Amino acid sequence: MTIKYQSQKVALPYMQLSLLLFVLQVIMGLWLAANYAFTLPQGLIDVFSFATSRAIHTNLLVAWMLLGFMGGAYFILPVECERELHSTKVAWLQLILFAAAAVTAVVGFLFGWTQGKPLLEIPVPLDLVIVVAALLFLFNILMTVLQAKNRTVLQWMLVGGVLFLALMYLFGIPFYSSLNTDYYYWWWVIHLWVEGAWELITASIIAFVIIQVTGVERKVVEKWLYVETGLFLFTGIVGTGHHYYWIGAPDYWLWWGGIFSALEPLPILLMVVDTWFHIRERKNPIVNQLLWVYIVALAIFHFIGAGLFGFVHTLPPINYYTHGSQITVSHGHMAFFGAYALLNLTVFYFALPQFKGIERYKATAGYWGFWIMAVSMFLLGLVFGVAGILQVYLERFLDIGYSTAHITMMFWFKVALFFGVCFLAGTLTTVYHLFTLKPVEEERSR
Amino acid sequence: MELKNARMIFWGGTLVSAAIFGWMTYDFHQQGETLAHNSKIDDRVIAGKKVWHKYNCNNCHTILGFGGYYAPDMTKAYYRLGANNIIAIVMNPQEVYRNSFRKMPQLGVTKIEAQNLVAFLHWTANIENRQWPPQDEKYVKAARLRESHPEKLQKTDLVLGACGGCHSFANQGRDIAGDFGEIAKRITYDHDTLIRYMQNPKSVKPDSDMPPQNVSPETAGLIADFILSLR
Ligand code: HEM
Ligand code: HEM
Ligand SMILES: [Fe+2]
């Protein structure tokens, strides 16, 4: 299979850069775990602290996710719209702006140039560069969709998701003098991204991949797409309230936030069900099984990480004790990996062989990479979870003080470090495999 | 199911949820005064918040439970530690946590910045957030009791309120730098020297690791009386 439209090629550098940042992000994760596992000397942490490393870890995460989404959109839209992209020049300019902003941001963090808001540390001038890049992107995909040969639900859902994503980013930029209001709008970015806009993008992209790979009827897939995204937004928007229990917000948020967010796993479960149905009723033969493995793993891990691990701490009586602990970290990792890391990797495994015109590729390294990553991330999530339960029990139930409660973490983070190294091995294997895809022998001899 | 119905589910669900959320956001802003005392945000609180951002404190410390989980939550730090302790810790973490298993970097926070931070943390600690975090509620209760009944203020409250971030007494406060029961037996300073020691430790004991304390002369006198009475 080769690409159908020349302009799809512009997606390639997006995906390659995305993979590179993924590796760097994971290395930073190991360093964070080392900060927990060992007592580092004062001289070292004075120049390169946990705070700096954490900002780099999470910003690289967001950067490689967004690059993956944008590359994915550029790859998908020509096929979906049956025409070339509006402009590959704009796509290149946008990539350069975005990459420059990301690199400057990371180097800036090292020198203490930061807005100091968790996950949204990028200083305002760089925010503006990112806004420009986002506007270029929106312009480019909107023009492509508007001039499409045919109209599909999927196109609009994808564009809608991206528009929603870009809009929410704006709420993180201003300085709020009230911490309470600050965090109210902070969640408009973080929560309405991962449990709103990004879910729309995921649902659309995976619907596209499923249509292409399984050959099931578009009408059926798009019906599911509407229902799932509708439920995502219905539960997810008011569900934002599960972050407002302890920030100083009116009492009724406990009910609205609790009930709506408790329903958030439903659309994710629906995604598992529909993926399973479509695969069972496939019209096409399975060519590269690894891609199918990724599609199924995405559905299941998404449900476990976001749905189950999210659900367990979303109700107020539980969240009162677990809020802002390592239990949150456990869920954060399982959900981000299960939903968005796997989504991007699925898209990469769909797209990258096409750039090289490979029909069937050798998949051994890919399987190794996948299983090592999936198993280590699951174990990593469990270890964070155990550390979190201990922390909550010692610090908040028994109330024996921060130091005594946290010193037990040194052991658990040594374990986390071990699984983290395994995870890095899996990441490197996967990235290596994706960069060096080779056709299987029989095809070459043909 | 028809595509048409599916589309209705999408728009119906989205708009209903967005409408509820919009109304709740409106109400959140209406109640900002009752719940967060937004009118009490003055220039120092704002300056303190900017310091908080400038040094990226939030990527190690949670506040309102958000941020890095590496170091103690700061929501109720004002009641847990008191102004003097916060200033001493933030300006001299390398001394305070010399023997700790987890350290805080020396960030170069100036005295004025530290004072503004205290104003910010004081405002933050008064947000009505349904008594979170659970482990700090005891400090909040004790501090509020002291504020509302200054006549019942005991000497130990005063001493630990000022020095309890690093010293302990009778199982209260935190023992990073010694228990006053033991220190009192060890030291040989007289009343005035002890006051001088609090305000400028190095002037009395050149190799002292204790940072200078921001206590008024009257408070310092009371604390000195208290410590010397333990001999
Ligand atoms: C793919 C989707 C999701 C992702 C990527 C995700 C990611 C995250 C992250 C990174 C945080 C921590 C934010 C911070 O404080 O720094 C978080 C918090 C939280 N998430 Fe999710 N999440 C997802 C879906 C869900 C779902 C579906 C639920 C509920 C059923 C949920 C419930 C929660 C709760 C209750 C918290 C707050 C934890 C606390 O109080 O500290 N999440 N999520
Ligand atoms: C070697 C593997 C990794 C290790 C050891 C690791 C470790 C860590 C640590 C120690 C933190 C800081 C938590 C805290 O503030 O106490 C963190 C934060 C975070 N990491 Fe990782 N990480 C790894 C890989 C990943 C991957 C692959 C993802 C996403 C796909 C990810 C997403 C995140 C997120 C979202 C946060 C912020 C969590 C929150 O605010 O609750 N990490 N990581
Ligand atoms: Fe959320």
Image (cartoon, coloured by chain):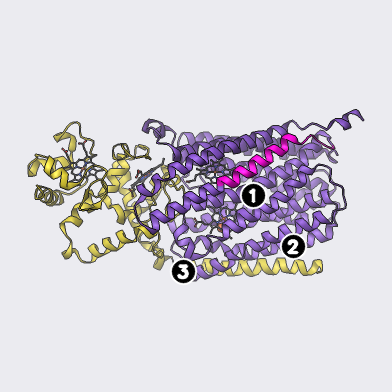
User: In the displayed structure, would residue B209 be above or below residue B131?
Assistant: above
Q: Which residue is identified by label 1?
A: A338
Q: CA distance from mark 3 to mark 2?
A: 33 Å
Q: Mark 2 and mark 1, same subunit?
A: yes
Q: Colour of chain B?
A: yellow
Which chain does the residue under circle 2 lie in?
A
Q: Quadrant of the N terminus of chain B?
A: bottom right
> In the rendered structure, which amino acid carries the disc numbered 2?
Tyr
Which mark, residue B30? Answer: none
Q: Which circle, 1 or 3, is nearer the viewer?
A: 1
Which mark, residue A250? Answer: 3
Q: Is residue A376 magenta?
A: yes
> In the rendered structure, which amino acid carries the disc numbered 3?
Pro
For label 2, the crowd category at 10 Å Cα-Cα, with few meaning under 14, some 14 to 19 and many 20 or more, is: many
Tell me which residue sits at (68%, 36%) in the image: A430
Q: Position of residue A162 (x, y in %)?
A: 68, 52
The residue range painted magenta reads A359-380
**Residue B105 image-quadrant placement:** top left
Which mark, residue A226? Answer: 2
